[in-house]
Image (cartoon, helix red, strand yellow):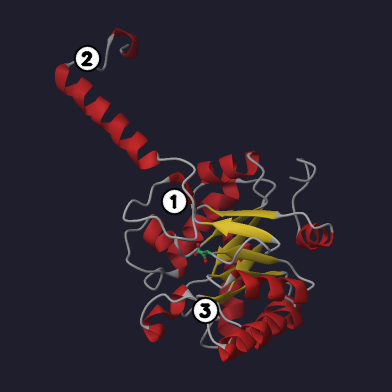
Amino acid sequence: MQDKQKKITVRYFRQKKENSEKILALTAYDAPTAKFAEECGIELILVGDSLGMALLGYKSTIPVTIEQSLHHCAAVARGAKFAFIVGDMPFMTYHPSAKTAMVNAARYIQEAGVDGVKLEGGKSIAGTVGKLVKAGVPVMGHIGLLPQSVLTQGGYRIAGKTKDDEQRLVADAKALEDAGAFCVVLECIPAELSARITESLKIPTIGIGAGPKCDGQVQVVNDILGLFTDFIPKHTKRYANLSEEIKKAFTAYANEVRSGKFPGGENSF
Ligand code: KIV
C-alpha cells in the first residue's frame, strides 16, 4: 500500500495502472475484516452486494436493500482508515432515474462514509455515471456477468462469448471511461477479451474471473477464506479454510461447557 498514513484516493489507482502495478481489492462487510484487509495491503475495499449471500443468507444479491448495504458500508468505513471504500449500490437503487441514483449515492458518501459507489452496467447507465461523477461521486463501473440481472438472464453466465457480446463489452467499458468512472470491474469475461479491454482503457480494470491481465483483482472475502462451502467457484482460490476452523472451535467450546471444563478458575472472578 502507499504511505500508510495517507488515505487512498482515485488518483492512486490511475497511477498504479500507469506504473503497471497491480491493484489489490477485496470485499468486506464489517469493521474487523476491513481493518485486517488494509493492514495486509488491500487498497480498495468493496462492500459488495454479495453481502446478501455472504452474510445475510439470501440466494442472490437481488433482495439486498439500501439500508442493509449502508449499515455494512458504515461498519467498513469505521474499520478501515486508509483503503478506498466502495459501496455497491443494490438492485433498483440507481435504475429508476439519474436523480434516484444521485440521491441514493449521496447517502453512501454522507451517511455511510464511503469514498465511492459501484453500479452494474455499461452504456445503458453511462448517463447516470456521468451525472454522479460531475456531482462529485467517484464511480466504479461493473460489466460482464451482472449478478443484479440474474432474473432477466435466467442465471449466471460468462460474458463475451460471441462476437456481438465482445463488441458490446468493449463499447460498454469505453462508455464508462468516457462518463468518468475511475475504474471498472470485469466479471467473468474470457481472459483474452479482458486483456484487450484493459489495454484499450486509461482507467484501471479490476478483474474477478477475468484473467491475469486486468490492472487489479477483486475477490469475495468469504470465497478466499473458505467460508462459502457449497462449492469453490472457478474464479476464486481458497487461501484458508475458516469454515473448518470455526467448526473446530465451536465444537471444542461446546464440549468444554458440556463437560464443565470451561469456564475454569482462570476464567472466573
Ligand atoms: O458484490 C460483489 O461482491 C461484487 C464483486 C463480485 C465484484 O460485485
Residue occupied by mark 3: 159
Identify residue type, mark 2.
Lys
Q: Residue furthest bottom?
A: 164
Q: Earlier in the sequence, mark 2 or mark 1?
A: 1
Q: Indicate the position of residue 99 as horizontal and vertical percent values.
A: 60, 85
Crowd class of label 1 (few under 14; some 14 to 19; many from 20; radius 10 Å): many
Residue occupied by mark 1: 222
Asked if 259 appears above or below 167 in the picture, the reply is: above
Residue at 75% from the left image edge and 40% from the top image edge: 4
Viewer-nearest of discs 3 and 1: 3
Residue 261, label in figure: 2
Disc 3 to disc 1: CB gap under 8 Å: no
Q: Indicate the position of residue 213 as horizontal and vertical percent values.
A: 68, 63
**Spatial CA span between label 2 and label 3:** 55 Å
Residue 1 picture quarter? top right
**Spatial CA span between label 3 and label 1:** 23 Å
Element at label 3: loop
Q: Indicate the position of residue 252 as horizontal and vertical percent values.
A: 26, 25
Identify residue type, mark 1.
Asn
